[in-house]
Image: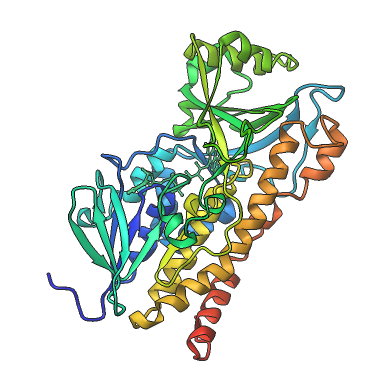
Amino acid sequence: MPSSPLAIRIAIIGGGLAGAALLRGLLRHPHLTVDMYESRPTFRDEGPGLSFTSRAQGILTAIDPELEYCLDRAGAVSATTEIRVAAGPHVGREIEINGFGESCKKYVSRQAFLAEMLNHVPPHMMHPGTRIASVTELPSEQGLLLAFADGSTKKYDIVIGADGTHGFTRQLVLGTDESLVKPHSTGFWGLPIRVPLQRAQQLMGTRSLDPSNPRHVCWIGDGTTIIYDLLDNGNEVQIIVFGKADDTGEEDGLSEPSWAKLFTPDEFREVFSSNSIPVCQGTIDLILSVYTVQVAALCLLEHHPAPTYVAENICLIGDSAHSMLPFQGASISLSIEEALLLSTLLGRLSSKAAIPAALRAFDQLCRPRAEQATRLSAETGLLIAGRAPGIGLNADLLQHHLRHKFEFLLNVDIEAHRTAAVSIMDQLLGVGAAWP
Ligand SMILES: Cc1cc2nc3c(=O)[nH]c(=O)nc-3n(C[C@H](O)[C@H](O)[C@H](O)COP(=O)(O)OP(=O)(O)OC[C@H]3O[C@@H](n4cnc5c(N)ncnc54)[C@H](O)[C@@H]3O)c2cc1C
C-alpha cells in the first residue's frame, strides 16, 4: 500500500524493552510509518526480570492502555520490598525506604513482558534477524539511508537508536570521542539466575519464598548484595547477586572494559563469606549448584553523561543513551518515560520540517533526568553493597541515605513532563502551546 504524502518514516534500531515500548507508543499515530529492527533472530530478552512501580505502571498505561494488562498476562507478581543488612554489627536490621509500602511494585520476567508487548504489533513492522550496518545522512534533507548487513538499503526520516549499551547509534549522535561513545567499567558485577520455585525453596527455605506473601528482598552485605523475588505468577524465583570490586579493572582507562568477571566456586563463596544469614548462604549454594565449574558474572558498565541525545533527525533512547548501574530499576523506568514523551512529540509532527524541534524538546526534558538517575543509581549501588564511604554497614546511616533516594522516580508527574515537552517543541517551532 503506498504511504500518504504526510507519512513520516521512522526506523527503530534495537528491539529490546526501550525499542518495543516506543513502538507501542508510535503505533497510535497513523501518520507515522514505523519499522523496528533487531539483529537477534527473534525478539528475545533473557536478561534479569523487571520491576514496575505503580507510577511506572501508570506511564505504561499512558503509552497504551493495553500495556498494563501485558504485565498481568506476563505473570507479573505484586510484592512488598524488604531491605536488610546482612553483615557487620547491625546484621538483620531492616532499612525502610519511603514509598515502598505494601505490594507497591510488580515484578515480571522481561522475556514474557516483551513477548506480550509485541504480541499485537503488525508483523510487517518488526524485523528480527536484521542487523543495521550503517546510517548515512542523505543530501538536500532527503532523510537517512539505512544499510543492512546483506547490502540492501532503505530510506527513513527519523532514526531512533535503541540498540543498547554496546550499540553503534551512539556514535552517530556523539561522533568519534571514545570516552563519550563507549561505556566504561564501574567495578560492579552482577549475576542473575532464575530457578523453579520448589528448587529454590529446597535451598533457601519456604518462609523467604512464599507465593502467598510475595516479597522482593535485598540483603546488604560487605561489598555484595543479594536480591530475590518471585516471577511468573509465583512459579519461578529470580535471584540477582551483585559485587563491588575495589578497582574497575581498567588499568589505563583506554582498554576495552571486560564483559565478564570469572570466579572459581571457592572464590565465589569467599566473596560472600562475611554474610552468614542462612537464606543468603542458601542462595549461594543454589547459584553454585548451577555454576559447578566456573562462575561467570556480568561486569556492569555505564556511559559518561552525553552532551546531547539527539542530532538533527537521530535520537537515542534507553541504554544507548544512558547505560547506568541497575540499582534503582531506573533504566526501565526512564526508558518507558522516554517512550511516552518521544511518541507524544513525534505524534504531533505535521511536517518533516518539525522533526528537529521534536527531538530537541525530547533531549531537553529527558537528558537531565537520566543524568540524575545515573548519579543516584551509582550512589545507591555503593550503599546497597555496603561500600559507601563513611557509611559502610551502619544501619542508621544506610537508612538515612537510602530513605529518599528513590523519590524522583516514584513521584514523577508524567503529565506535567508531557505538557512541558510539548510546550518546548512549540516554542522551538515558534507557535503557541496547544496541549492537551
Ligand atoms: C545484571 C543486570 C541486572 C539488571 N537489573 C535491572 C533491573 O532490575 N531493572 C532495570 O530497570 N534494569 C535492570 N538492568 C538494566 C536493563 O537490563 C537495561 O537497562 C535494559 O535492558 C536496556 O534496554 P534497551 O532496550 O535500552 O537495550 P537492550 O535491552 O540492550 O536492547 C538493545 C537491542 O538492540 C539490538 N541491537 C544492537 N545492535 C543492533 C544493530 N546494529 N541492528 C539491530 N539491532 C541491534 C540488540 O540485539 C538488543 O536486542 C539490569 C542489567 C543487568 C546487566
Percent x, y of residue 221: 73, 25
Residue at 69%, 49% (x, y): give it: 376
Q: Nearer the viewer, residue 25 or 138?
A: 138
Q: Is residue 276 depicted above or below 154 in this figure?
A: above
Q: Left or right of 16: which side holds 209?
A: right
Q: Is residue 250 left or right of residue 396?
A: left
| Residue 186 quadrant | top right
Whether residue 344 is visible here, answered yes or no, is yes
Residue at position x 51%, y 47% in the image: 182
Residue 288, image x, y percentages: 54, 12
**What residue sits 81% from the left and 44% below the top?**
401
Position of residue 252 measured from the top left corner of the image (x, y, whole percent): 62, 36
Left/right of residue 130 with respect to residue 111 in the rendered view: left
The colour scheme of the drawn protein is rainbow
Q: Position of residue 195 (x, y in %)?
A: 47, 21
Examine the rendered structure and indicate whether residue 161 appears above or below residue 92: below
Frontmost residue, 66 versus 281: 281
Q: Residue furthest left?
A: 1
Q: Can see residue 238?
A: no
Where is 324 relative to 172, above or below?
above
Q: Quadrant of ligand 1?
A: top left
Quarter of the figure with the N terminus: bottom left
Q: How many marks?
A: 0
Q: Quadrant of residue 273?
A: top right
Q: Nearer the viewer, residue 236 or 11?
A: 11
Look at the picture and state if 329 lies above or below 390: below
Rendered residue at 29%/51% (across/down): 133
Q: Quadrant of residue 88?
A: top right
